[in-house]
Amino acid sequence: MPRGYFITFEGLDGSGKTTQLRRLAISLESKGRTVVTLRQPGGTVLGDRIRSILLDSRSEASLGPIAPAAEMALMFADRAQSIAEVILPALAAGSIILCDRYTDSSEAYQGGGRQLGSQRILAMHAAACDNLQPDLTLLLLPSLESSLRRARRRNQRHVEKQGTDENRFERESDDFYRRIYEKYEEIAAREPHRVATIREDASIDHIEEIIRRIVLSRLDHAEA
Ligand code: TYD
């Protein structure tokens, strides 16, 4: 059985990566591939509990502010569990894994946004994840202006909806998102082979087509 293929999706809040992930899953499944999808944080029983601690804005009221290093450690506890429970078994079974966010999110959000720096995140990745790297990362990164606009719009939608709790990250400032954006740029420049950066600010259908082409050509190479 061939080893599976591990793909992650990255980008700022509101970048559209979740929609693209779903579309890619449908397209790969229609070609007869076995696809496993998951998101981080979450996707396991432990991970869903961690997710609600991390993302529920009310948890700040009940828990007090979460220290950046605690936030980082919780993200990695979630990740270590999903590697053991979902990712490694799916890879061993030859599946294609589509994961909504992975360690690049920790580097961008905690390393960049919360200013912990890349080194701490990469050390944590080695310790908690045995350095498991995706085969391919699809980074949706339109211009900074457009990314900030999308993040703000998404923030606004959460505020209007009220009652949806998952907005702790989305209440952050433009500066926070600017630091995340810059960290993503840094990761893309550092690892150009792994990270395919999609900068187009185009329609959902157009981006879907770009992603489909990248993925099919990578899979062809991997399986040649
Ligand atoms: P989610 O609702 O999944 O947002 P999105 O659809 O944008 O992925 O919330 C995930 C949030 O958690 C998002 O704001 C990014 C943040 N996050 C981190 O800060 N560090 C991490 O390691 C991960 C995986 C996510």
Image: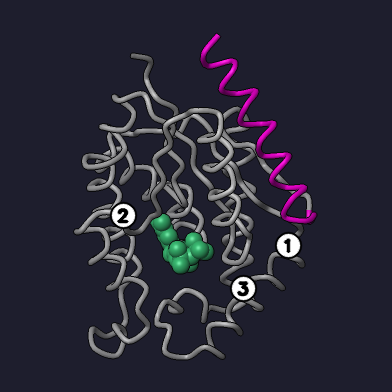
Q: Which residue is drawn at 29% across and 39% down?
A: 129
State whether residue 39 is above or below residue 136: below
Q: For mark 1, what is the residue?
A: 144
State whether residue 202 is above or below residue 131: below
State whether residue 173 is above or below residue 46: below
Q: Give the range drawn in magenta.
A: 201-224
Residue depth check, mark 1 versus mark 3: number of the one nearer the observer: 1
Earlier in the chain: of badge 2 and badge 3, it is 2
Earlier in the chain: of badge 1 and badge 3, it is 1
Which amino acid type is shown beneath numbered disc 2? Gly
**Which disc is residue 5 wearing?**
none
- Name the spot of residue 124 as percent of width and height, x first: 30, 46
Q: Which residue is drawn at 49% across and 28% down?
A: 32
Q: Are marks 2 and 3 in contact (CB under 8 Å)?
A: no
Which amino acid type is shown beneath numbered disc 1? Leu
Residue 208 lies within the magenta run: yes
